[in-house]
Image (cartoon, grey):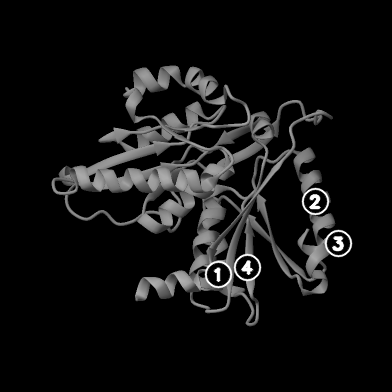
Amino acid sequence: MLAGTLGDRLAAYFVREERPGASEELIARADANEAVLAAIVPDCRIFRIEVFADDSAPVGGTRIAAILSDNPIPAGVTDVILDLSALSIGIGFPAARILLEDCEAEVDRAFHLMITSNPELDDRIVTIPSSRTSPVRGFAPPIVGSAEELAQIWIPQLAHGRTASLTRIGAAIGRCYKICPLLPFPSRNPRRADDLLSEYQVALTDEWEIDPRDILYASEKNPLDCYRTLSTLKKRFDRAIGDTYEPRMILSPVGSKVLAAGALMAAIEHEMAVHYQETESYSIVDAAEPADGPCETDVHLILSGPLYGSYDKAGQT
């Protein structure tokens, strides 16, 4: 789409995430995709990032930060577009934050997010998480005050096949003032939220002891709905318990990238923490794509740039 419109004005950085548990089939597909992308955008650079260090610590966020620092966006670039569709949270979130800050420092440069979403395909992807739970680089705001004054509000995004991973993340976070699971609704599959509630029944009732009134819902198609939901929740907790405790919201966006984009915006604006488990390997159930399967949905967001200039001026008057 961009290559057809911009022609030789388009330049790209392609990021390839390398994991020790990748299958030969997955590596072959990645090689083929890399060749196709390089042919579409000849003016490109391909960066291969080892997601894990030798001791199995997740270091993708640190390495993407170093790459962006060593390879700044050239002067004269008017638009920077980050495609989150195939990036892991550990790399996509730090990259988004760094690029947003860089673009905000340039008056005439806009920053865009792009996501191609297919929830049915996401449900067929099987992940093997690492044994370590950690905050995402750049999304671990410091704790002010003592532990007794801290009120942690954890928002796990429920997704198919991630029960064990979210359970380990919750155990690593520790005591929480509230746990508010996030469900995709409305969604393309009207029963998706119900199916997830059934899948997570033991965790919701026995482990997390969720009050049904604390369950959150956000549109599967619109990241701004998730952003507004989390922003409103933050303001309510600040108003309700801010005089007694230090509210600390912790996000775990392990599912849909559309919802993750909304969580990303809320985390950046309100300094929320993001905890996750990096994935060691991926596989797919029923690799043959159904001919009549649901189509993909494209989402485009503009987070900064000249488009917002009039709003900034209005806020200063």
Indicate the position of residue 208 as horizontal and vertical percent values.
Answer: 34, 25
**Relative to 146, 255 lies left or right:** right
Is mark 4 in CB contact (under 8 Å) with mark 1? no
Identify the mark nearer the N-term, 3 or 1: 3
**Observer-nearest residue: 251 or 232?**
232
Q: Which residue is drawn at 53% across and 38% down?
A: 219
**Residue 234 sits above or below residue 13 on the image:** above
**What amino acid is labelled 4 in the image?**
Val
Instruction: Name the residue beneath numbered marker 3.
Output: 39
**What amino acid is labelled 1 in the image?**
Leu
Where does the N terminus fall, quadrant-wise? bottom right
**Observer-nearest residue: 62 or 314?**
314
How packed mark 1 is, by other alpha carbons closer than 10 Å (few <14, some 14-19, many 20 or more), is few
Identify the mark nearer the N-term, 2 or 1: 2
**Relative to 53, 204 lies left or right:** left
**Relative to 96, 229 lies left or right:** left
Indicate the position of residue 317 as horizontal and vertical percent values.
Answer: 34, 76
Instruction: Name the residue beneath numbered marker 2.
Output: 33
Instruction: Name the residue beneath numbered marker 1.
Output: 307
Is mark 2 in CB contact (under 8 Å) with mark 1? no
Q: Which residue is drawn at 35% across and 38% down?
A: 154
Question: Could you tell me which secondary element the residue under label 4 belongs to?
Answer: strand
How packed mark 2 is, by other alpha carbons closer than 10 Å (few <14, some 14-19, many 20 or more), is few
Indicate the position of residue 70 as horizontal and vertical percent values.
Answer: 58, 74
Mark 4 or 1: the one toward you: 1
Question: Could you tell me which secondary element the residue under label 3 belongs to?
Answer: helix
Report, in whole angstroms, how far the alpha carbon at label 2 lies from the one at label 3.
Answer: 10 Å
Report, in whole angstroms, how far the alpha carbon at label 4 lies from the one at label 2.
Answer: 22 Å
Instruction: Name the residue beneath numbered marker 4.
Output: 80
